[in-house]
Image (tube, helix red, strand yellow):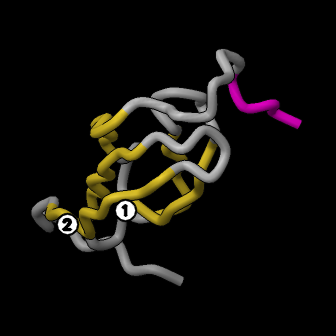
Amino acid sequence: MSMLVEGTPPYVRGTFQQTCGYCGCVFSVRVPGRIGYEGPENYYCPECHKRFPVKASRAPGVTLISKRCDGRKANYPDL
């Protein structure tokens, strides 16, 4: 059980660089946090839209570093 703490300021829970295993693009992810407000969120590859889960206070920000290199044009198959 998480405790809701009134007035807690938001913070950056983490920032990291990731390479998509499907299309090969490289992007950075900025994960926001806020004590008492964190839960399951998703972020998506900016090139193929593959979904990745993370714990955050809201949807993470994603910034493309280098474009996909797999030669395909299709999005990740959402099964």
**Residue 35 as seen in the image, left or right of residue 25:** left
Write down the region rendered in magenta.
75-79
- Quarter of image, res 1: bottom right
User: Can you give x and y, in whole percent of width and height, for residue 69 in the image?
Assistant: 52, 34
- Quarter of image, res 59: top left
Q: Residue at x 15, y 59 (%)?
A: 10
For this orientation, the residue located farthest to the right is 79
Does the magenta stretch mainly form a helix, a strand or a loop?
loop
Residue contact at pointers 2 and 1, CB within 8 angstroms? no
The residue closer to the viewer here, 57 or 78, is 78
For this orientation, the residue located farthest to the top is 73
Q: How many marks?
A: 2
Classed neighbour count for the residue bearing mark 2: other residues with Cα under 10 Å, few (<14), some (14–19), many (≥20): few
First in sequence: mark 2 vs mark 1: 2
Q: Amino acid at mark 2?
A: Glu
In the image, residue 69 lies in the stretch drawn in magenta: no
Q: Amino acid at mark 1?
A: Tyr
User: Can you give x and y, in whole percent of width and height, for residue 47 in the image?
Assistant: 50, 27
Q: Residue at x 65, y 16 (%)?
A: 73
Q: For the C terminus, give its image quadrant.
A: top right
- Quarter of image, res 23: top right
Question: Disc 1 marks which residue?
Answer: 37
Question: Disc 2 marks which residue?
Answer: 6
Q: Residue at x 14, y 67 (%)?
A: 8
Residue 58, relative to residue 18: is it above or below?
above
The residue closer to the viewer here, 20 or 35, is 20
Tell me the SS state at disc 1: loop
Tell me the SS state at disc 2: loop
User: Can you give x and y, in whole percent of width and height, for residue 48 in the image?
Assistant: 60, 28
Q: Residue at x 54, y 44 (%)?
A: 24
**Residue 19 as seen in the image, left or right of residue 7:** right
Residue 61, relative to residue 14: is it above or below?
above
